[in-house]
């Protein structure tokens, strides 16, 4: 199991103040990695830093707004300065605006695409420049099941996540010769701060659960194994892939309507 050991490695995780990002930080720390976490407000990262340090690993907080190019360059440079090296990038920062397509505004579209797609690319680019010098690196772009499936009310979000999948494949080809693996981790339906209100609707949760072959939404820890795999030497020959961790919802199974007696 030594191939999954991240001791001596350092990970940079964007959007690490809460939700999945905070979980990613602790999962990699449990596997042995030190962690740099980012958020638009570094004060929001205190809980994540404390959680990582409680696991016996080093942790640093860095401010980063992925919609600003100067912020990206400065944050990545600061991460390298603090940690000495970045072996793993988890490109997690993202946002969403849920609206029917006819109600999506120009600004809604720009917010989502600038955060979820443009920001992901330029953070990866800034890290790759340094990883190339070392001839090694793991880049994990966080997508979602909307990388492969479309849903009503999520047109800009789906466009950003579909773009993440295609971009991941392109970057894997670009940077593979330099020893850099680029993959996309695509979660299914997990309860987060962004979608918490949807989970307050029991009818919707029942409807969602029925569509998932494993009969439950994602839970804490369900992403950890795949994340550590993609960050570790165990995935050294895996690149350009979108790894769906979704309970099977992407199979698109259609439930039969029960016959009336």
Image: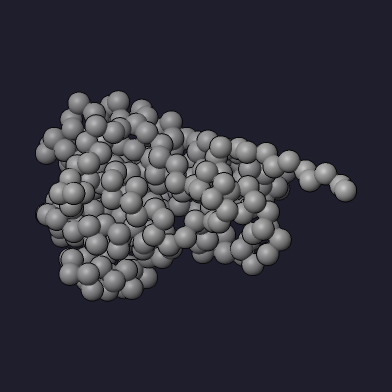
Position in image of residue 21 (x %, y %):
38, 59
What residue is rendered at 28% in x and 33% in y?
238
What residue is rendered at 23% in x and 73% in y?
54
Residue 68 showing in the rendered view? no
In which quadrant of the rendered view does residue 237 lie?
A: top left
Please state if 162 lies on the left or on the right of 102 as rendered: left
What residue is rendered at 45% in x and 52% in y?
94
Position in image of residue 259 (x %, y %):
83, 44
Residue 26 showing in the rendered view? yes
Position in image of residue 165 (x %, y %):
44, 35
Position in image of residue 246 (x %, y %):
49, 47
Of all residues, the one furthest to the front in this rendering is: 261
What colour-coding does the image apply?
one colour
Q: How many marks?
A: 0
What residue is rendered at 53% in x and 36% in y?
148
Q: In this rendered view, identify the residue nearer to me: 24 or 127.
A: 24
Please state if 107 lies on the left or on the right of 139 as rendered: right
Q: In this rendered view, identify the residue nearer to me: 261 or 142.
A: 261
Please state if 238 lies on the left or on the right of 256 as rendered: left
Note whether 258 is above or below 40 in the view shown: above
Q: In this rendered view, identify the residue nearer to me: 107 or 123.
A: 123
């Amino acid at each position: 199991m030594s191939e999954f050991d991240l001791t001596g490695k350092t990970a940079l995780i964007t959007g690490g103040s809460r939700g999945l990002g905070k979980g990613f930080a602790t999962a990699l720390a449990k596997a042995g990695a030190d962690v740099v976490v980012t958020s638009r407000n570094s004060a929001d990262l205190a809980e994540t830093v404390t959680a990582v340090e409680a696991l016996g690993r080093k942790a640093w907080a860095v401010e980063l707004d992925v919609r600003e190019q100067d912020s990206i360059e400065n944050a990545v440079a600061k991460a390298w300065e603090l940690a000495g090296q970045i072996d793993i990038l988890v490109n997690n920062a993202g946002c969403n605006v849920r609206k029917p397509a006819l109600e999506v505004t120009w600004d809604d579209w720009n917010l989502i695409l600038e955060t979820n797609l443009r920001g992901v690319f330029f953070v990866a680019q800034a890290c790759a420049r340094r990883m190339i010098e070392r001839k090694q690196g793991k880049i994990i772009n966080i997508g979602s099941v909307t990388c492969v499936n479309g849903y009503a009310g999520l047109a800009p979000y789906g466009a950003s996540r579909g773009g993440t999948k295609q971009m991941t494949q392109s970057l894997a080809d670009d940077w593979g010769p330099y020893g850099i693996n680029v993959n996309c981790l695509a979660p299914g339906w997990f309860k987060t701060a962004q979608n918490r209100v949807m989970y307050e609707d029991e009818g919707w949760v029942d409807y969602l659960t029925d569509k998932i072959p494993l009969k439950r939404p994602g839970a804490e820890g369900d992403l950890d194994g795949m994340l550590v795999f993609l960050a570790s030497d165990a995935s050294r020959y895996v690149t350009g892939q979108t790894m769906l961790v979704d309970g099977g919802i992407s199979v698109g199974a259609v439930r039969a309507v029960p016959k009336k007696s």
